[in-house]
Amino acid sequence: MDSHLKETRIASAEAYDGNFLKVQRDTVQLPDGKATTREYIKHPGAVVILPLFEDGTVLLERQYRYPLERVFIEYPAGKIDPGEDHLACAKRELLEETGYTATEWQHVCTIHNAIAYSDEHLELYLARGLAGGERKLDDGEFLDVFKAPLTDMLDWVREGKVTDVKTVIGTFWLEKIVAGDWKLP
């Protein structure tokens, strides 16, 4: 990495404090010595769970979400609470949203989905050894939980039926993991 291109924070202030998102406004020194203002969305981060059954099917959720007003097919996911360990969050979200637990957990990767505009990070986890139970949805949360073959998910992504960024990325990771092409640490 070219450290001579690094920007340095000079000053920082909160520009917006919302219920879900916050906006930070920083004054930074550019590599040429000039100063400029950068704004970015502050977000505590989230987890994405890739629940994979022994038979190659995946556990999915279907929900209708505003503002895009369309049905979303996605993997279980959720916002990390302040100070919460992301693996603990993944276990909690899988149970709350789907009623499932997993005996095997493996961190797959970290994704920064809008790196120039947000500090949000998504922690992807592979969950295996799934067993069903009772779910506990958050207030105002409505989800259908269903299973589908990974091959169907790949088709749905390629056909544009699944457009959620974390689900698209997770599906391509799963394709490589299941095929044995990508080894996880």
Image: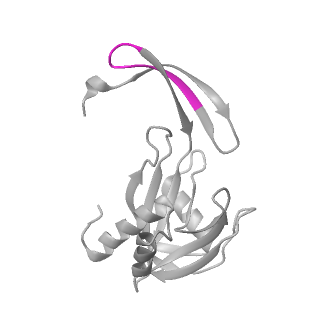
| Percent position of residue 67, x then y | 66, 56
Q: Residue furthest bottom?
A: 55
* Relative height, residue 55 to residue 143 (above, below): below
Q: Is residue 132 magenta?
A: no
Colour option used: one colour
* Relative height, residue 107 to residue 98 (above, below): above
Which quarter of the picture shows residue 29? top left
Q: Is residue 33 magenta?
A: yes
| Percent position of residue 158, x then y | 40, 71
Name the residue: 42% across, 51% down: 111
Name the residue: 54% across, 74% down: 60
Q: Is residue 104 visible?
A: no
Comparing 76 with 129, the one in front is: 76
Range drawn in magenta? 24-34
Comparing 57 with 164, the one in front is: 164
As drawn, is 62 to the left or to the right of 167? right
Name the residue: 44% across, 64% down: 168
Comparing 184 with 111, the one in front is: 111
| Percent position of residue 143, x then y | 66, 71
As drawn, is 42 to the left or to the right of 160? right
